Amino acid sequence: MKRILICPVCKSDEIVLDAGGYTGKYYCKNCGYVGSFIIELTEGEYEELLKAGELERFIEEKAKNVPKDAKRPEKYPHENP
């Protein structure tokens, strides 16, 4: 079953491994969040929460421990200067 990765900051599903997975962190293409904490759901769980209208609340509940100042680094190696 496919797994869906969700950013705890902006709730986007545009998450990729940072540095090819070498660092154990993830990078959000939408907001620039870099960190090891992400929300991971199976496709079934994602669809079930979406149908029930509980996806947003579920993500917010899980993301309570993300620091408020979690943000994009000043220079990120994947970007062009």
Image: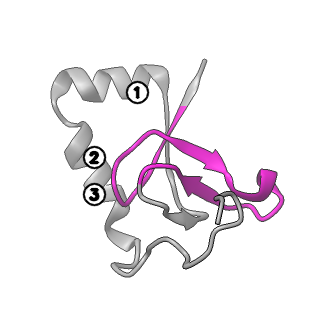
Q: Secondary structure at mark 1?
A: helix
Task: Check residue 7 for magenta coloring.
Answer: yes
Of the two numbered discs 2 and 1 on the same chain, state the one appearing first in sequence.
1
Residue highlighted by disc 3: 61
Please state the horizontal and vertical placement of residue 16, each as a whole percent of the image: 63, 45
Please state the horizontal and vertical placement of residue 58, each as a whole percent of the image: 28, 46
Residue highlighted by disc 2: 58
Give the label on residue 45, or none: 1
39 shown above or below 46: below
- Using the numbered discs, state the Cα–Cα distance from disc 2 to disc 1 in whole angstroms: 11 Å
Residue lying at 64% horizontally and 68% vertically, measured from the top left: 76
Which scheme is used to colour this image of the protein? one colour
Labelled pair 3, 1 in contact (Cβ < 8 Å):
no
Residue 9: name its quadrant: bottom left
Left or right of residue 18, residue 40 in this image: left
Q: Secondary structure at mark 2?
A: helix
Q: In front: 65, or 78?
A: 78
Left or right of residue 34, residue 59 in this image: left
